[in-house]
Image (tube, rainbow, N blue to C red):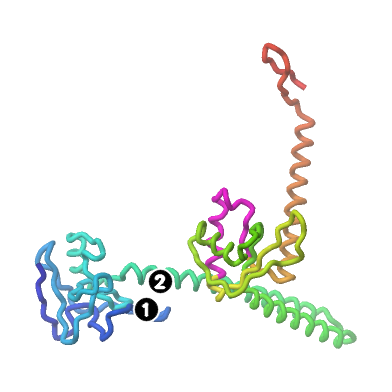
């Protein structure tokens, strides 16, 4: 049973007044914070009956069942939901309605969208911090070169400085151009099937994202016993970042062993990554050689072919 509660003179009995359109839910742009109403909370008369919020305009429909008289008002989308449409127990809904004017409430869809926007912001912030660090490094290098130069090399230093600045700008522009791309390695081509469909099937079956592909093509020349990398051009940087985060799931899938999704690196980034891999291999080889030398200098126990199953020490 529902009870009607009249609106107070200081503000509406509900948290949000009904809007003219109730067929779709619109979300405010990121960064807009909606504070709860300062009006007093209206407790329900019992645990199983809730107060119905009244309004002088047309009632807003519940986004779930398209029926009016929703009690739970979302602070972001202004949608009025029924507790039973949210699979919420009566006791929980009663407590929530008694404090909703003080604490506020956000529906599941708004929470999901806010989390997605937050992840996009965090990715953009990390990318911006990386670019700022690169610019600081370039500026420090230019300052060191300027301080260590002599008057006789002023022209040469000016030329070098312009070359460095131009190289930094070119690298940044190239990195920006590749920011929407990803490179898929290990994805074998299939006769009669387009590469775009192969990639979409991989995402559909194994990943939690379904990106929109603008263009895709194989890199390099076709060679025997070598799978050409597949370049995927997506519609936005956020799509590429979300796909790269989701691609970690491929490591835990046996059918996707050997398939990797990485960023489309610039030539400078690719060279730096190659040098880093070389250093790691050299360090691993040194550790392995040292371990083998230590084993050679110690006594090892090897299985014997004796009938009694005993072992011989070497």
Q: Position of residue 141 (x, y in %)?
A: 75, 76
Number of the label disc, if any, that sits on residue 113: 2
Q: Residue at x 57, y 52 (%)?
A: 251
Q: Say whether residue 227 is magenta.
A: no
Mark 2 in CB contact with mark 1 (< 8 angstroms): yes
- Of residue 283 and residue 177, the one placed in the foreground of this image is 177
Q: Residue at x 67, y 15 (%)?
A: 309
Please, which residue is most extreme toward the top here?
A: 308
Q: CA distance from mark 2 to mark 1?
A: 9 Å
Residue range of the region highlighted in magenta in the rendering: 240-262
Q: Position of residue 208 (x, y in %)?
A: 48, 61
- Count up the numbered dots: 2
Task: Please name the predominant secondary structure of the magenta segment in the image.
Answer: helix
Q: Residue at x 48, y 69 (%)?
A: 119
Q: Residues within 10 Å of mark 1 (few under 14, many from 20)?
A: some
Residue placed under numbered mark 1 in the picture = 27
Number of the label disc, if any, that sits on residue 122: none
Please, which residue is most extreme toward the right here?
A: 152
């Amino acid at each position: 049973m529902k009870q009607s509660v009249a609106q107070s003179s200081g503000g509406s009995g509900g948290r949000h007044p009904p809007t003219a359109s109730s067929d779709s839910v619109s979300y405010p742009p990121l960064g807009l914070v909606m504070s709860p109403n300062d009006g007093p909370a209206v407790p329900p008369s019992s645990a199983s009956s809730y107060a119905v919020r009244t309004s002088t305009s047309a009632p807003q429909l519940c986004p779930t069942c398209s029926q009016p008289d929703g009690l739970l008002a979302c602070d972001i989308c202004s949608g009025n939901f029924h507790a039973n449409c949210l699979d919420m127990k009566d006791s929980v809904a009663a407590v929530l309605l008694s404090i909703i004017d003080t604490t506020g409430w956000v529906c599941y869809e708004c929470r999901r969208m806010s989390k997605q926007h937050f992840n996009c912001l965090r990715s953009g912030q990390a990318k911006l911090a990386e670019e700022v660090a690169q610019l600081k490094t370039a500026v420090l290098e230019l300052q060191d070169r300027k301080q260590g130069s002599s008057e006789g090399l002023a022209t040469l230093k000016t030329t070098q400085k312009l070359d460095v600045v131009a190289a930094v700008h070119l690298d940044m522009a190239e990195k920006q151009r590749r920011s929407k791309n990803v490179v898929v390695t290990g994805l074998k081509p299939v006769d009669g099937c387009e590469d775009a469909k192969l990639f979409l099937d991989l995402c559909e079956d194994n990943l939690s994202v379904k990106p929109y592909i603008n263009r895709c093509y194989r890199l390099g020349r076709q060679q025997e016993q070598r799978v050409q990398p597949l370049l995927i051009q997506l519609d936005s940087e956020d799509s590429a970042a979300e796909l790269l985060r989701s691609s970690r799931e491929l490591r835990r899938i046996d059918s996707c062993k050997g398939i990797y999704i990485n960023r489309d690196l610039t030539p400078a980034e690719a060279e730096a990554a190659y040098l880093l891999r070389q250093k790691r291999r050299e360090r691993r080889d040194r550790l392995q050689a040292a371990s083998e030398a230590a084993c050679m200098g110690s006594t090892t126990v090897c299985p014997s072919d004796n009938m009694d199953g005993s072992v011989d020490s070497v």
